Amino acid sequence: MLAGGGRIRVLRLPEAVPQRLRDWVRGSSTGLVALSLLVGCGAGAGAVLFRYLILWFTRLFSGSDDYSGLGLVPNSLVPGLGIWFVVLAPVVGGLIYGPLIYRFAREARGHGVPEVMLAVAEHGGRIRPQVAIIKSLASALCIGSGGSVGREGPIVQIGSALGSAIGQAVKVPESRLRLLVACGAAGGISATFNAPIAGVVFALELILRDFQAESFGMVVLASVAANVIGRAAFGSGAFLSLPPFELTSYWEYLLYAVLGVVAALVGVAFIRVLYGLEDVADRIWRGPEWLRPGAGGVLFGLLLLAVPQMYGVGYPVLESAIDGKYVLGFLLLLLVAKIVATSLTIAIGGSGGVFAPSLFMGAMLGSAFGLVAHQLFPDITGPAGAYGLVGMGAVFAGATRAPLTAVIIIFELTGEYRIILPLMFAIVVAAGISNLVSKDTIYTLKLRRRGIDILRGRSANLMELLTVADAMRPVPAVLDSSAALDEVIASFADTEHDALPVADSQGEFRGVLTIGQVEEAVRDNTLDATAGDLALETPTIRPEQTLEATLERLVQYPGSGLPVVSPDGGRVVGWITHQDVLKAYAARLQRTLADVGSQDPIASNQKDSRGGRRLSRYRVVDLELAADGPPVGRLVADLELPASTALLALRRDGQILSPGEGSSLRKGDRLTMLVPSDRVDALADALRGTH
């Protein structure tokens, strides 16, 4: 339930649960299987509930199960309004879900999938639990009141939030938490579309970006579990009921290639219009953010008044187009109207996906293309519906650049296999052309506009740039392995450390002795024990290791610190504790902020609540010099970097080098830089030959 301040408390495993059971759930393979199945079942149940919520709100606002298929027939539950209810419904819906999103979960605004991608890429899979609840209500209200968006984005975010909540509740490691988020996304797609394979591919290709065996297996389990629940609720038939299509002539492949090119351009146009209208709305709107969906609902309602087929998701209209019930001019009108309607819904602050709208656009484009092709080449072309079916996948691939998902989702949504070869061909063409025309997809552009490029940059993490040599302290008194117990006790009495390294007469490291072990030896009266007898084998750290890896070892080891040994592993050359790591990180952060602030007066004037400068306007970007051309062979000092860019590290062959002015760059070097978010593209342009 919602707690004070709009937060939901994360459930924790009861302390009474045996530690062994908690460890099994968190760390074992069978425990991961159990969690994946649990997340899949939860995502499936969430998808069923979400679809019923949409149906209930749609009936409440329009008096029908799906008003888009009724055309101009008034069917409002409000007597006397007639067709004018389409103007009132988005306003009322916006006045409800606008404050809901603003108050409890602002990440529930928009199309959802980018937020999940960001959580997996940069936040370790952590998503606030309330997102699942707020996204369900807000998206169902938005779609039910006429919002021209899809339900796949919300169900992905809902399932992912559920998977994250379960993972956080049992405190699984981040690697498993990310996997559970992907399981939730796969389960949501699988259950809501009756598409178990597409759910798996979507989660692996777009969310997790990982096709390893363990990831694949767990996501499959979640998808199957969710699909069983979805089929129990909605049946096992194909999601869309379309007539069968097949290839009429091999010459049609040329036409499908042309369709792929056009579909890519439409997909990119959809991206541009979507974010262009959002920019316009941001510039125009000056009122409170929670009121924006309600106020914008008036404009959207007028659009519905002109083209009522844009009400909600619009699957009945899509099926009618594929069935050949619309003429060419009307198909083109619906294509343009859908681009505008979906973009406007998102721009005014609506909540819903762009997956289904891209399928809708593809159906309109493909059917229109098919009509023209059949008129020009009647002897070698099949029905227009075949092109509409292929167009669905091609536009989706052009907008998202996820060709595997596009192929599988169209196949599973329709159950039509005979069109698979033209479908694959057109989708590959569309994805390729889209990649040439636009560097961003409809999902990644939302993040990059906020200064987040999950394909090239990461959140600032200086721990990967600092080594143990930057943080370690001098070696405490080393105990000789032959030292008697009374000598050991005297050594501990003269030091502030509660653990000391032990070495033999040649100086070779033999382990660590803690004060607790000494106390235990005294209690047991083992007075003849030596330091070597009592010393325990412990993990050791090398000076060249990063603090990122070192911190993981320190967390796993219960002692107060770890010895730092020479590169050959023989001698103890230093000592490192948690406090040393934090001190080194804080010192490097202050130096970095000072360097940036000296170049950027705006950054230097921005202070957080503790007086430090903010890094929110900056990204840490890794770029690999993958070509033999410039800047390979040039000096670091000769690089023409954008203003206010700080070069943090130069990595070569796995080693972190000092980016000194005399360093000459080589192929394969990795440059790590702190770059203003709005200058990341300029950096890529400046460093030609990188990727």
Image (cartoon, grey):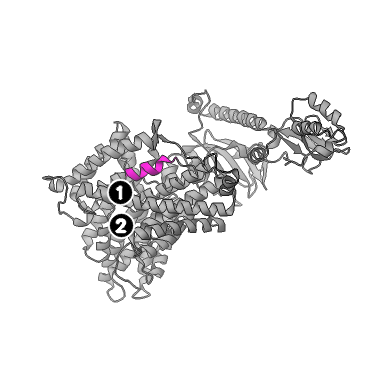
Q: Is residue 68 above or below residue 609?
A: below
| Visible residue check, residue 432 | no
- Magenta highlight range: 128-138
Q: Is residue 489 above or below residue 571?
A: above
> Label 1's element?
helix
Q: Which residue has dot 2 on it?
A: 360
Q: Nearer the viewer, residue 100 or 86?
A: 100
* Relative horizontal placement of residue 241, taking residue 624 as reference (left or right): left
Which kind of residue does numbered mark 2 sit on? Phe
* Relative horizontal placement of residue 69, taking residue 219 as reference (left or right): left
Q: Say few, some or many: other residues with alpha carbon within 10 Å of mark 1 (under 14 / 14 to 19 / 20 or more).
A: some
| Visible residue check, residue 265 | yes
**Considering the image in quadrants, where does the N terminus appear?**
top left
From the top left corner, tell me how far across and down residue 234 is, in percent: 33, 59
Instruction: Tell me where residue 328 sits by quadrant.
Output: bottom left
Measure the C-alpha gap from mark 1 to mark 2: 22 Å
Q: Which residue has dot 1 on it?
A: 53
Q: Nearer the viewer, residue 180 or 338?
A: 180
Q: Say few, some or many: other residues with alpha carbon within 10 Å of mark 2 (under 14 / 14 to 19 / 20 or more).
A: many
Query: Disc 1 vs disc 2: which is toward the camera?
Result: 1
Q: Which mark is residue 147?
A: none
Q: Nearer the viewer, residue 78 or 600?
A: 78
Residue extending furthest left?
A: 80
Q: Is residue 556 magenta?
A: no
Which circle's residue, 1 or 2, is located before the other in the chain? 1
* Relative horizontal placement of residue 294, taking residue 128 as reference (left or right): left
From the top left corner, tell me how far across and down residue 673 is, in percent: 57, 39
From the top left corner, tell me how far across and down residue 283 is, in percent: 32, 35
> Label 2's element?
helix
Q: Nearer the viewer, residue 73 or 347?
A: 73
From the top left corner, tell me how far across and down residue 414 is, in percent: 34, 65
Which kind of residue does numbered mark 1 sit on? Leu
